[in-house]
Image (spheres, rainbow, N blue to C red):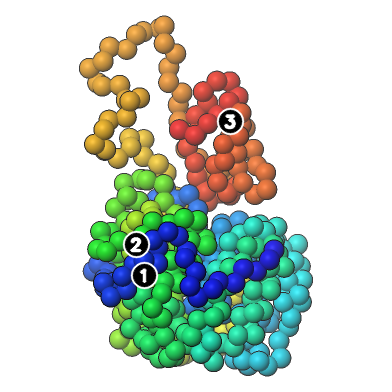
């Protein structure tokens, strides 16, 4: 698949970049402590910067059956650091221009992992939207490393959009960024006078609505211990606290997309006094409100114990702590985040739609007399995972997606994590409720 490069003056969607940057203000609700619950999720994506960008790539490749695309700022290709605990290779070859394997070699290793079941089928990556960003003033992760990531994805047929003409330093770039565009300085969220977040979301989701000026959603603070191996998030360099931004429509059961957003090193909630800075300035919540999207913000922490040295709270993209499976199924941080995604995706559409100003024409008022036996009963809506629909004969799968028998309506990914609600309107003919 050809790599598309974005020009600096690119108009992403009509009106999208017409947001008046001077009127953009940072905001994030105060956290509301509660357990993570399920929502009606139609598709899942992942994004990240620096170490979070490396982990975003690992999640996308390892669980390509779950993630439909990725947006990555300043990171290199999958398993660039090697088998495990290759900190030197990570810092020299995978961030600078030292010795490292070629994208073709890494792709071949990925195919071998897929053949052994350690990662999902690489065929899932074909056609997936991928947005990559690298600034010309980024000397932390060199441009050649980011180029390797683009080549790696392109080799699997992903639909890659690559922005590499910005003057940005090493950072997530957002209209809310407090750091000058070309700098590399804490909190590593830069403002270059445009909207790469809008570009990223447009590349992944298609046309998007303009971001909200004032947030109306809720920031849920949940316990990451509930999703970590052995119930101990700290042991794998993850915080006890995790966060999810949930717009009101998603809370009411409307079909929503899920974005996993991964901060970089020195950007975690509990890193020194960083707090909610990444969640506040990433500019994802503003788009979430107007585009029915939940944003999951997992959190990493610094950790220095026997076998683990991670003083800056980076995500595990080089196998620290002796985690040999850091980049595939069984990787401790990957498993923890995947468990959060499964939990968030465990809900379904409400049996009664959220109230609207105009009552649906198909709703029968309670006082209406229903003719007795002359009218056939309404088909029963069945909510289940797309995998269960196929095994029960209600749907079939093709190319990694599930389709309703009869109507051939697309239900979503053919996985145990994606759910849909369908009904049998005549024998053997199923369609969406």
* Quadrant housing the N terminus: bottom right
Label 1 Cα neighbours within 10 Å, binned few <14 / some 14-19 / many ≥20: many
Residue at 64% across / 38% down in the picture? 396
Q: Secondary structure at mark 1?
A: loop
Q: CA distance from mark 2 to mark 1?
A: 8 Å
Is the residue under label 1 in contact with that under label 2 (CB below 8 Å)?
Answer: yes
Residue at 54% across / 66% down in the picture? 70
**Residue ID for mark 2:** 211
- Which mark is in front, 2 or 1? 2
Rendering quarter of residue 33: bottom left
**Residue ID for mark 3:** 407
Q: CA distance from mark 2 to mark 3?
A: 35 Å
Q: Give the mark, 2 or 3, whose residue is nearer the N terminus.
A: 2
Q: Secondary structure at mark 3?
A: loop
Query: Is 58 in front, or is 304?
Result: 58
Q: Measuring from the top left, give residue 292's x and y in whole percent.
A: 38, 53
Q: CA distance from mark 3 to mark 1?
A: 39 Å
Q: Give the mark, 3 or 1, whose residue is nearer the N terminus.
A: 1
Label 3 Cα neighbours within 10 Å, binned few <14 / some 14-19 / many ≥20: some
Is the residue under label 3 in contact with that under label 2 (CB below 8 Å)?
Answer: no
Q: Measuring from the top left, give residue 2's x and y in whole percent.
A: 68, 66
Q: Secondary structure at mark 2?
A: loop
Q: Which mark is residue 86?
A: none
Residue 51 can be seen, yes or no: no
Q: Give the mark, 2 or 1, whose residue is nearer the N terminus.
A: 2
Residue at 55% across / 46% down in the picture? 412
Horizontal relation, residue 142 to residue 242: left or right: right
**Residue ID for mark 1:** 283
- Which mark is in front, 3 or 1? 1
């Amino acid at each position: 698949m050809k790599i598309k490069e974005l020009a600096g003056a690119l108009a992403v969607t009509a009106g999208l970049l017409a947001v008046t940057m001077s009127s953009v203000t940072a905001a994030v609700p105060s956290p509301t402590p509660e357990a993570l619950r399920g929502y009606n999720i139609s598709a899942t994506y992942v994004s990240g910067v620096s170490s979070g960008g490396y982990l975003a790539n690992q999640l996308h490749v390892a669980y390509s059956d779950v993630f439909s695309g990725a947006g990555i700022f300043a990171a290199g290709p999958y398993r660039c650091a090697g088998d495990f605990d290759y900190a030197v290779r990570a810092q020299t070859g995978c961030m600078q221009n030292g010795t490292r394997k070629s994208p073709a070699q890494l792709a071949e290793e990925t195919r071998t992992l897929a053949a052994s079941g350690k990662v999902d089928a690489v065929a899932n990556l074909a056609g997936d939207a991928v947005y990559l960003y690298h600034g010309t003033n980024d000397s932390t992760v060199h441009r050649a490393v980011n180029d390797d990531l683009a080549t790696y994805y392109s080799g699997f047929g992903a639909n890659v959009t690559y922005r590499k003409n910005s003057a940005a330093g090493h950072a997530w770039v957002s209209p809310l960024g407090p750091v000058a565009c070309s700098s590399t300085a804490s909190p590593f969220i830069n403002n270059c006078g445009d909207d790469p977040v809008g570009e990223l979301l447009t590349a992944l989701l298609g046309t998007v609505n303009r971001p909200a000026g004032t947030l109306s959603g809720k920031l849920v603070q949940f316990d990451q211990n509930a999703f970590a191996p052995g119930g101990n998030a700290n042991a794998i360099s993850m915080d006890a606290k995790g966060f999810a931004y949930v717009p009101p429509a998603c809370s009411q059961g409307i079909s929503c997309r899920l974005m996993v957003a991964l901060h970089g090193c020195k950007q975690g909630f509990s890193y020194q006094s960083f707090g909610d800075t990444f969640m506040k300035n990433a500019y994802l919540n503003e788009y979430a409100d107007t585009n029915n999207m939940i944003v999951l913000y997992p959190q990493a922490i610094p950790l220095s114990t026997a076998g683990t040295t991670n003083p800056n709270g980076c995500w595990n993209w080089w196998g620290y702590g002796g985690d040999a499976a850091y980049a595939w199924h069984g990787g401790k941080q990957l498993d923890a985040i995947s468990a959060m995604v499964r939990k968030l995706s465990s809900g379904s559409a409400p049996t009664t739609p959220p109230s609207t100003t105009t009552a649906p024409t198909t709703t029968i008022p309670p006082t209406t007399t229903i003719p007795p036996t002359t009218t056939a009963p309404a088909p029963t809506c069945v909510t289940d995972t797309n995998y269960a629909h196929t095994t029960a004969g209600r749907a079939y799968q093709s190319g990694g997606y599930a389709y309703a028998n009869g109507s051939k309506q697309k239900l979503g990914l053919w996985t145990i994590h994606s759910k849909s609600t369908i009904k049998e309107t005549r024998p053997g003919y199923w369609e969406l409720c």
